[in-house]
Amino acid sequence: MPESVTPKGASAPDRRSTARAIRALAIPAFGALIAEPLFLLADSAIVGHLGVPQLAGVGLAATVLQTVVGLMVFLAYSTTPAVARLLGAGRHADALAVGRDGLWLAALLGLVLAVAGMFAGGGLLNAMGARGDVFEYAHEYFMISLAGIPAMLLVMAAMGVLRGLQDTKTPLLVAAAGFGVNIVMNFFFVYGLGMSVGGAALGTVIAQWGMAAVYLVIVGRAARRHDVGLRPDWAGVRAVSRVGSWLMLRTLSLRAAILVTVLVVTAQGPTNLAAHQLAMTLFSFLAFALDALAIAAQALIGKELGGGNIPQVRVLTRTMTRWGLGFGVLTGLGLWAASGAVGWIFTTDAGVHAALTAALLVMAVGQPLAGYVFVLDGVLIGAGDARYLALVGVGNLVIYLPLLFWVSHLQFGDTVSGMFWVWAAFSVGYMGARGLTLGLRARTGRWMQVGVPASRG
């Protein structure tokens, strides 16, 4: 369809209204997206003052948990565009039915993963290189945290539903309440009851289940208002799982990159591992901040494609790409300015401070690239271009592994140089490969798949 043609029933692109629509979704999405990184930052800040082994153990356990749960992010990423397209086509009840089925799938997967983690947790942590005190603390944190996995997946799926319905304000309120509960619980269990890392895990689990309960009530009430039953449509559950298969492969490549990075850092020593845990937590925090634009892209582009409004899709893509680059510059400058001081929030260990500063300086340089990558990722997810994202994700990992292999064989040990080169490989090498492949795809029009799912009735 030519860019100058506006489909019947679709509005012509308006840059001011486009900017307002992006802000209306992206600003509240920022608060909701950073809930999980804030939970981990709170755990890190509280546990960090207990000692380096405790901090390293929590970091290792959190990496495994984030990897397992992160593979299920398709629960949000496949639901958001599907719900948005149906909403754009005026099929509100069908949109809520898709969301309901996504929640059932989340609950089932959460139970399976929690049970599997009880048997496989120790082996996973050993495979990650945890030994001695680091293993003990990691195992304690991991086993208690398993109880929160079903809640985390329910929260993912429910946020996907609300984003597809163009609502990011409700997730912001839920996230803010959850973070407040998490902080209070963690301080009480760790310092009030002397439960060490187990207390930090327990406080987070309680907060996660509270958030899940609130979301279930919200989605359930919306479903009843549109006469959508709460019992699952098992054909719909299977459809959600099929749609998410490519997105799972895409996410698997991302998590594999993070995991192999942790393996290299673990071999360098506990000081670098502790610093890397803090750096990766901060990276996740900033990534979710940048990803707020990506969430807006998923919701808005899905809705406009559902209505067949290609010109508006093009305007949205150009606008959000510029914003992603600009926001990356701002976060990079802020990170650069804070790089030498932020470590004192988490630990008093001078070695961890030095290694963390090196990582943060490299991370700061890569922030504009990260903003570009996250926005285009969201655009293509919103368009349903999951197959391309999965295939190039594997290709990007293939490019990254030799870089990381080279760094690991330089044998820096527990040094600042080791941390610098690990983060250079990740922030410049890996993210650069992602930026190139996403940018090339965005320049074509093949990802603009207009249409909505077939009627569920």
Image: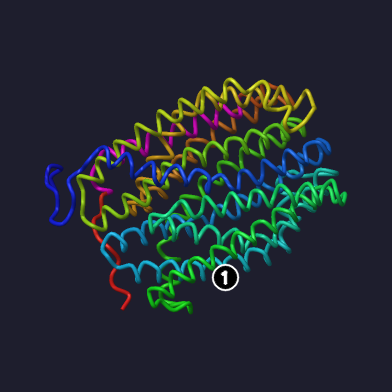
Q: Quadrant of the C terminus?
A: bottom left
- Could you say which is closer to the camera, residue 322 or residue 401? 322
Residue at 52% x, 38% y is 287
Residue situated furthest right in the rendering: 194
66 within the magenta span: no
In the rendered image of this protein, does residue 391 appear above or below residue 396?
Answer: below
Residue 388: x and y, percent?
36, 49
User: Is 359 displayed left or right of 354 in the figure?
Assistant: left
Residue at 69% x, 57% y is 205
- Looking at the picture, the colour scheme in use is rainbow
Q: How many marks?
A: 1
- Could you say which is closer to the camera, residue 315 or residue 110? 315
Task: Give amino acid for label 1.
Answer: Leu
Residue 405: x and y, percent?
59, 33
Residue at 44% x, 58% y is 162
In the rendered image of this protein, does residue 407 appear above or below residue 373?
Answer: above
Residue 189: x and y, percent?
81, 52
Quadrant of the rendered image containing residue 119: bottom right
Q: Tell me the chief SS of the magenta region.
A: helix
Residue 65: x and y, percent?
65, 52
In the rendered image of this protein, does residue 98 appear above or below residue 293?
Answer: below
Residue at 42% x, 60% y is 79
Quadrant of the rendered image containing residue 213: bottom right
- Could you say which is closer to the camera, residue 298 or residue 171? 171
Over which residues does the magenta segment extend?
421-447
SS of the residue at dot 1?
A: helix
User: Is 60 displayed left or right of 229 in the figure?
Assistant: right
445 within the magenta span: yes
Quadrant of the rendered image containing residue 109: bottom right
**Residue wearing tag 1:** 108
Q: Residues within 10 Å of mark 1 (few under 14, many from 20)?
A: few
